[in-house]
Amino acid sequence: MPRPSAASTRQRLLAAAAALFAARGYRGASVRAICARAGIANLAAIAYYYRDKERLFAAVAALPARRLAASIAEFSDPGLPLSAALVRLYRAMLAPLAAGSVEAAAMGAIARCLGEGRRLPRRAMSDVQRHRRAVEALVSRQVPGIGKASCALAADALIALAMQQIARRYHPCRERRQPAVRDVEPLAQRLAGYAAAIIAYERRSCRASRSAALSHPRNRDR
């Protein structure tokens, strides 16, 4: 029987780690459990291929983080109508679910990691922050005059809509992989509708704030 190649072993470890980090969190996914899921008896395999569990987690997190950063151009064009921009945003974020890929589990690992308050590795965090800033810019263009704090809160809400869908597939009590989403388009359309409602709310809030400020006696006298 031929021995598996180094590339194959690395990929098996990466896939096993992504699934377990998503299902159990960083602390709950032991080196022993990752190797067992990958079908590798030698516990030193992680040290050999990734040096340690921390760097293995970094490799897992880098997969979806790179995708998020690369997808910015798809939804950030200022000339795009809001509905089209939002659908593109969610289409890109949910794309890994369609194939039930390692990247989908890695997205689940990121969602679990952020939910537990754990910091992402530096490179992955940089890509995730670039993506978040692009979402903030989208909100800012659609809601003129929105404050920095409100813009950040709205951007977080938009991103959370997709991350919740991804995290649901990797519930800690349900490690068995869920069926792949055959078509992300209906889900992307639905989330875009929810996101549009959040942006509409922020617009109304901004208008109400400006109206209240203009109607203040001190401002009327100017």
Image (tube, grey):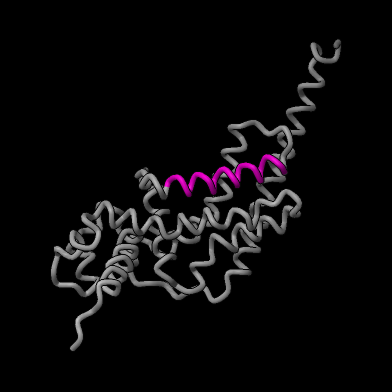
Q: Is residue 176 above or below residue 61?
A: below
Q: Residue 137 in the image: state x and y as whole percent.
A: 64, 42
Give the residue drawn at x 72%, y 57%.
83
Task: State left or right for residue 75 relative to residue 178.
Answer: right
The answer to whether 149 is drawn above or below residue 95 in the figure is above
Judge by depth and name the residue closer to the eye, 123 or 103.
123
Specify the principal SS of the magenta part.
helix
> What residue do we see at 57% from left, 62% from top?
92
Left or right of 121 on screen, residue 180: right
Name the outermost residue toward the right: 221
| Left or right placement of residue 40 versus residue 166 in this view | left
**Residue at 58% across, 49% down:** 158
Q: Residue 206 appears at what percent x and percent y?
A: 72, 33
Observer-nearest of 131 and 191: 131
- Nearer to the camera, 179 or 104: 104
Count of labels shown? Answer: 0
Tell me, yes or no, whether the highlighted magenta stretch contains residue 129: yes
Residue at the bottom extreme of this rendering: 1
Pick the front one: 170 or 134: 134
Can you tell which quarter of the image residue 22 is in? bottom left
Which x, y percent locates residue 172?
Answer: 33, 60
Residue 14 figure quarter: bottom left
Is 75 a magenta residue? no
The residue drawn where x is 77% and y is 27% is 210
Give the quadrant of the C terminus.
Answer: top right
The stretch of residues the image draws in magenta is: 125-141
**Which of the 4 image quadrants contains residue 5?**
bottom left
**Quarter placement of the N terminus:** bottom left
- Specify whether 21 is left or right of 115: left
Q: Is residue 164 above or below residue 144?
A: below
